[in-house]
Image (spheres, rainbow, N blue to C red):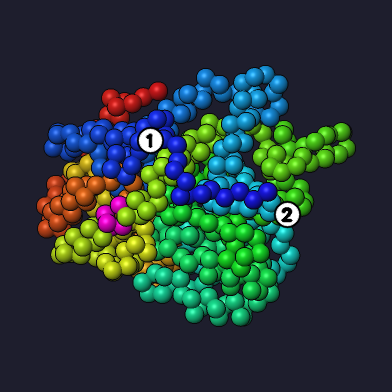
């Protein structure tokens, strides 16, 4: 059976509310929550760290709460609530399949913990022979790099000086390694520069040499529609992996969607309850998919939350999401470029802003990225992220760190000194961020670049973080268990 979502079909209202790109902010949980600043004032937290995790949406938490009355373990129960929960769990699976246009006659949707677990699962279940190559890129998050090293010979496609995948090198590696390449594993979009990769073109290249393609869609999925396309189409994506916590549903679920055959063959990676049809003291006979690959009790609530997040995204509509995030990115780049002392990395072009995500990395003059992120937090109430973003090789390329510098850095880090770790500050946008928030970031960065920030930041060398001794965070005033 093949199922496609018809995105043109008018969707149901979510929880009977008309959700649009203009109204979504009021549904973002905690968006107006005030936090303390160094000067003793308070202001609503500005969250520009959406590439790490997004906040949730009240329409999702309401749905989760509504479900909790009916919550029970799935599959193995005969009680009403268990049967209801099983139905809802499978409905969530179908919602995901439709969302990414997976052809269910060929593909299976597997629930995991997150993208990292999903990619590890594929690495463990893909049938590699000695000498087989996984072709990946220098751009990748460690989660789409380290799992492959354990199971295959990993070959890296270079990146260009501005950080794009170098397609000449890509083609060269394809012709050099040819049929030894069994899998091409690339990100849909970069968590460092926001570059969006033409994964369907890469799918053509993979299939032309008899390989498959796996797309790490962790960053792409909240910002662009994904169409896995039918098997047999040269642009078909064989596998994708993503996490719900990056798409407004931080309830602990991730997804691997991909080729059934890979999981039908061989033993599951985790075994135990739920994975078998029958067991005797010598043998276990595996259940059909997806049960075979989902050992133990799954994250049923997480699946419900993800399905509802998909509903919210579809209700808002991709055109409006892309328009909003692109115009925010355009505005931010335009303003950031004019701040003396700010260096931007990756794509700085305004004309092509719709071809990238709202993930912007920068540095200020000679200031340590960790110091800048700390000042933004303590003095401006702005949440960003700094460092290498779990993409060390990529960040080293973008910063043109030499081999000798890289070796020195490794030595220092292994000696527990992260004070000179290279990196950037990253601001990343979601559907609910505003131009006023971009203005606040730019005002803060202008001030910092002019040296207008408080004295007294201390460096914790081991962690590579800046902190202060004149304020206590007092988190328990805000929340404690
Ligand atoms: C591109 C990319 N891949 C993989 C991951 C890992 O995601 P998770 O931590 O949800 O496993 C991330 C997380 O930031 C990411 O940005």
Would residue 433 be seen by someone viewing this image from the given angle? yes
- Give x and y (percent) for residue 281: 87, 33
Residue shown at 43% from the left, 55% from the top: 224
Left or right, 210 with reference to 246: right
Q: Give the range drawn in magenta.
A: 324-329
Establish if 137 lies above or below 144: below
Q: What element carries label 2?
A: helix
Residue shown at 51% from the left, 78% from the top: 169
Q: Which of 458 and 378 is in front in this view?
A: 378
Q: Residue beneath label 2, please?
A: 261
Q: In which quarter of the image is residue 357?
A: bottom left
Q: Nearer the viewer, residue 221 or 246?
A: 221
Quadrant of the snapshot with the C terminus? top left
Would residue 418 be seen by someone viewing this image from the given angle? no
Q: What element carries label 1?
A: loop
Q: Nearer the viewer, residue 471 or 224?
A: 224
- Give x and y (percent) for residue 186: 52, 63
Q: Does the magenta stretch include residue 116?
A: no
The verdict on label 1 being within 8 Å of ligand 1 is no
Q: Is residue 328 magenta?
A: yes
By secondary structure, the bulk of the magenta-drawn segment is best described as helix
Answer with mark 2 or mark 1, whichever residue precedes in sequence: 1
Left or right, 83 with reference to 170: right
Q: Which of 119 and 240 is in front in this view?
A: 240
Q: Residue beneath label 1, please?
A: 57
Residue shown at 55% from the left, 42% from the top: 95
Near mark 2 (Cα within 10 A), the count class, few <14, some 14-19 or many ≥20, is few
- Give x and y (percent) for residue 359: 34, 56
| Inter-mark Cα distance, 2 to 1 | 36 Å
Q: Are marks 2 and 1 in contact (CB under 8 Å)?
A: no
Q: Which residue lies furthest to the front in this view?
A: 9
């Amino acid at each position: 059976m093949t199922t496609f979502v018809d995105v043109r079909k008018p969707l149901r209202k979510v929880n009977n509310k008309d959700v649009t790109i203009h109204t979504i902010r009021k549904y973002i949980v905690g968006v107006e929550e005030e936090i303390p600043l160094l000067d003793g004032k308070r202001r609503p937290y500005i969250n520009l760290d959406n590439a790490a995790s997004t906040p949730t949406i009240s329409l999702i938490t309401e749905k989760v709460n509504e479900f909790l009355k009916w919550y029970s373990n799935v599959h193995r129960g005969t009680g009403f609530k268990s049967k209801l929960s099983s139905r809802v769990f499978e409905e969530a699976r179908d919602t995901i399949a439709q969302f990414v246009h997976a052809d269910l006659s060929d593909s299976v949707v597997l629930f995991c913990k997150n993208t990292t677990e999903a990619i590890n699962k594929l690495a463990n279940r893909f049938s590699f022979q000695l000498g087989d190559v996984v072709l990946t890129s220098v751009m990748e998050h460690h989660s789409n790099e380290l799992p492959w090293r354990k199971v295959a010979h990993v070959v890296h496609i270079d990146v260009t000086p501005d950080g794009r995948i170098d397609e000449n090198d890509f083609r060269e590696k394809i012709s050099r390694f040819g049929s030894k390449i069994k899998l091409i594993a690339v990100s849909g979009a970069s968590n460092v520069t926001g570059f969006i990769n033409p994964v369907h073109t890469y799918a053509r290249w993979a299939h032309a040499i008899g390989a498959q393609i796996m797309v790490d869609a962790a960053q792409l999925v909240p910002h662009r529609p994904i169409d896995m396309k039918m098997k047999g189409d040269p642009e078909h994506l064989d596998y994708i992996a993503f996490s719900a916590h990056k798409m407004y549903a931080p309830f602990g679920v991730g997804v691997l969607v991909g080729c059934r055959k890979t999981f039908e063959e061989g033993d599951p990676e985790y075994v135990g309850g739920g994975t078998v049809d029958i067991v005797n003291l010598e043998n276990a006979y595996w259940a059909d998919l997806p049960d075979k690959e989902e050992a133990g009790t799954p994250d049923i609530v997480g699946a419900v939350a993800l399905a509802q997040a998909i509903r919210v995204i579809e209700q808002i509509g991709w055109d409006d999401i892309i328009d909003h995030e692109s115009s925010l990115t355009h505005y931010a780049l335009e303003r950031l470029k004019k701040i003396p002392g700010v260096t931007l990395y990756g794509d700085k072009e305004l004309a092509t802003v719709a071809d990238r995500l709202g993930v912007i990395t920068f540095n200020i003059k000679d200031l340590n990225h960790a110091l800048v992120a700390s000042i933004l937090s303590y003095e401006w109430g702005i949440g960003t992220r700094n460092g290498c973003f779990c993409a060390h090789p990529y960040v080293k390329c973008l910063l043109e760190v030499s081999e000798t510098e890289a070796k020195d850095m490794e030595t220092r880090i292994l000696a527990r000194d992260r004070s000179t770790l290279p990196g950037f500050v990253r601001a990343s946008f979601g559907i609910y961020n505003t131009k006023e928030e971009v203005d606040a970031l730019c005002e803060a960065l202008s001030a910092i670049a002019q040296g207008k920030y408080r004295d007294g930041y201390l460096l914790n060398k081991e962690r590579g973080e800046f902190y202060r001794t004149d304020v206590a965070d007092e988190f328990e005033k805000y929340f404690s268990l």
